[in-house]
Image (tube, rainbow, N blue to C red):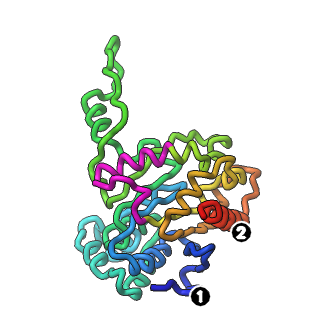
Amino acid sequence: MDFPKINDELFRYHAISGKDVFTVDSHHQALLPWSIIRRRLSSAPNLITLDHHTDTHPPFLGYIYLKYESQGEDFDRDASTRASLLQEISWRNEDSVRTAISRLQYDEHIHTATRTDILNYAFVIQLIDSYGTQSIELERYEKENPWTYQWGRKYPPRPFPPFTYAQPEGKTFIIPSSFKCSVDEYSRVLEGGNLSNLLQIAGEMAQSVEILKLEATRYILDIDLDFFHTNKAIEPDDPSVFHRLIRNAEAITIAVEEGCTLNLQIDGEGISVQTLLQKLDGHIAMALKSGN
């Protein structure tokens, strides 16, 4: 099927050298482009997303809270409400996806998509969670060796990769971040060496759920502009790995999230979302040109 050639109230569409690019203002609106992409595939694609946040809130968390708060009840007690709302969503039915978006709030879109067959698994490359999805080996080690100070105690060596992983909640793997909030580190988020290391971890996670090679699957590359805290971040010295992700992606979704993007920038950077969007288009064009 062909993608729409006009803009929608929830997204803006354009193609660069045949690569489909959808831009949304708020990240949860990406659920609609993801469902459109899903409709042309025989099975749900995976998601590789670059984001400052992990975006792993349960579906309809805010909507359910407001519903029960208005009734003076405990919103946690009715898990059936979430299940019922999820059952109303079908990627085949665009109206149901639009209704879901109207009920979603920040960070709830990924779990909504993985629980409704819009996405298969999600792999989140992010900047705020240094632990991420813990491996089975590290969880066992920390349980057996709690870090309480004991004079003279010698701890056994920590396990080292490769690790194995249990299927996480919402089928969403969080790749741990090692960033320490420095300008230099934030400026290297797209550098080939950094992305390569993170994708290697994502690949180990994928293998635990029988995805032998993540980048060889059908996946959507999703980018939140708040991933970029400096102007240098969007202009890596080595964009080769980022360009590979672009070339191999089924499609690309971009979340502007202007408020978060501007609030999270390093002081004095003067980041412009329009400039970031233009530079992303440049990367996409360059990646596809170099891949021909």
Q: CA separation, marks 1 and 2? A: 20 Å
Could you say where residue 181 lies in the image, as x and y percent from the top left?
A: 60, 42
In this rendering, the answer to whether 237 lies above or below 153 is below
Check disc 2 and report the residue beneath it.
Answer: 274
Q: Secondary structure at mark 2?
A: helix
Drawn side of residue 117 relative to residue 4, left or right:
left
Q: Amino acid at mark 1?
A: Ile
Could you say where residue 226 lies in the image, as x and y percent from the top left?
A: 60, 59
In the rendered image, which quarter contains the N terminus?
Answer: bottom left
Q: Main secondary structure of the magenta part?
A: helix
In the rendered image, which quarter contains the C terminus?
Answer: bottom right
Q: As rendered, which of 151 and 83 lies closer to the eye?
A: 83
Please tell me in which quadrant of the rendered image residue 244 appears: bottom right
In this rendering, the answer to whether 277 lies above or below 4 is above
Magenta stretch holds residue 146: no
Q: Residue at x 32, y 73 (%)?
A: 116
Q: Secondary structure at mark 1?
A: loop
- Mark number for residue 6? 1
Question: Which class describes the residues within 10 Å of circle 2: few (<14), some (14-19), or many (20+)?
Answer: few
Decide which of tag 1 and tag 2 comes sooner along the chain: 1
Q: Residue at x 26, y 35 (%)?
A: 140
Could you say where residue 117 lies in the image, as x and y percent from the top left?
A: 32, 72
* Magenta stretch bounds: 197-218
Asked whether residue 42 appears in the rendered view, the answer is yes
Drawn side of residue 229 relative to residue 154, left or right:
right
Could you say where residue 157 lies in the image, as x and y percent from the top left?
A: 34, 23
